[in-house]
Image (tube, grey):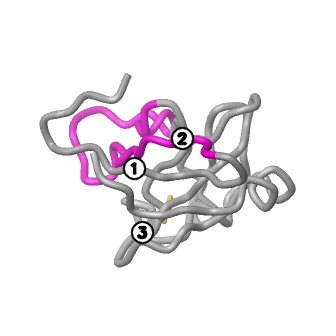
Amino acid sequence: MREVARIPLAQLMEATVVRASYPPRDICVVWVGGEAYAIEDTCSHGEASLSRGRVRGYSIACPAHGYVFSLLTGERSAPRIAGESLCNRQKRYITRVEGEEVVILEPSPVELIP
Ligand code: FES
């Protein structure tokens, strides 16, 4: 795992959704249920910014066409489309609160996210 971004915890708690810089696709960080979740910000469907979307429970809806992605897994939960497509899932990141900051970590390809 390697650290790729940090954001202030207070900023995230106040805003609920923060876009963390990690070019080229950045990271959408969401505060829900007392924890931080992070998935790739650039929507795999049409490249809109998920951090401008609406949070619904542990999911976020893309502002462009309404595709819904799980914050827990990064997978698209709606609409349901049979078969594989390029927009099935968003990359997921690990988050850890350290003092007054949320640290965002990128897992190595062989690590599994618990
Ligand atoms: S760009 Fe996100 S659903 Fe189309």
Q: Which residue is mark 2?
A: 96
In the image, residue 29 sits, relative to residue 114, either above or below, namely below
Q: Is residue 17 magenta?
A: no
Q: Which residue is mark 3?
A: 46
Which quadrant is the N terminus positioned in?
top left
Q: Give the amino acid at mark 2.
A: Arg
Q: Give the amino acid at mark 3.
A: Gly
Q: Where is residue 30? Give x, y as percent.
A: 66, 48
> Which is more N-terminal, label 3 or label 1?
3
Marks 1 and 3 sit apart, C-alpha to C-alpha, by: 25 Å
> Outermost residue toward the left?
110
Which quadrant is the C terminus positioned in?
top left
Q: Which residue is mark 1?
A: 105
> Outermost residue toward the bottom?
24
- Find out if the beta carbon at label 3 lies less than 8 Å from the nearest ligand 1 atom: yes
Q: Where is residue 13? Give x, y as percent.
A: 81, 50
Over which residues does the magenta segment extend? 73-98
Q: Quadrant of residue 47?
A: bottom left
Residue drawn where x is 33% and y is 50% of the image: 106
- Disc 1 packing (10 Å; few <14; some 14–19; many ≥20): some
